[in-house]
Image: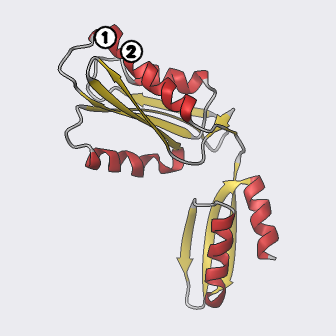
Amino acid sequence: MYSVDSIFQTQTEEKRSKFISFLVPYHQFKVLYAEAKEQHPKANHIVYAYRYLNEHNQIVENSSDDGEPKGAAGTPTLNHLRGADIIESALFTVRYFGGIKLGVGGMVRAYSSAAAAVIEHAELLPYEALEEFCYEAPYPMQRQVEYHLNSCQIDNIEREFGSESVKWHITAPESKLRKLKQLLV
């Protein structure tokens, strides 16, 4: 299984319709999808598909056609995630209508090629299960801890600010947490 740890973007065109695809880590999907809706208000459709593991280690997947004919956009996108064995990731495609109707078959091909292009462009990493780690430190050490989090490329963090200390709730792959723990000693 594979996943991504950063955002990848490509653009394809089919009969003057423009397709902008994004492959993103699942934990960033909701925020990035909302940003795409804001940044592309004139887009006709923003189709998505995602796959992630739940607390029972089962794959949960979903897709949306966002007004395109049923099964013509979200399902082909999801099928590409399945085919590449990608989890803990989401793929969404922004479509600008170019004035020429594609038909259902044409849309399936267009969304499939858009998904394939962004997956091909992406740097897929072998999937590592995410683990949780809590760390607490006094305020004078906050900058040092943040520096170590950045150097380990850990960004799935929640902070709790107490009266005398900061508590970090960190979710990251085991290998990154191991490196962080070594730096925090």
Task: Give amino acid for label 1.
Answer: Val
Question: Residue beneath label 1, please?
Answer: 104
- The amino acid at mark 2 is Val
Q: Quadrant of residue 183?
A: bottom right
Residue visible at 63% across and 90% down in the picture: 140
Question: Quick check: 73 above or below 103?
Answer: below
> Which colour assignment does the render follow?
secondary structure
Residue 25 visible: yes
Is residue 75 shown to the viewer in this render?
Answer: no
Q: Residue at x 21, y 14 (%)?
A: 101
Check the image and report above or below for 177 versus 95. below
Callout 1: SS: helix
Work out whether residue 101 or residue 27 is closer to the camera in this orientation and state it: 101
Helix, strand or loop at mark 2:
helix
- Residue 52, located in which quarter of the rendered image? top right
Q: Is residue 91 above or below residue 41?
A: above
Q: Residues within 10 Å of mark 1 (few under 14, many from 20)?
A: some
- The residue closer to the viewer here, 69 or 16, is 16
State which quarter of the image contains the C terminus: bottom right
Residue 90 image position (x, y, % from top left) = 49, 38
For the N terminus, the image quarter is top right
At 62% from the left and 72% from the top, the residue drawn is 168
Can you tell which quarter of the image residue 93 is in?
Answer: top left
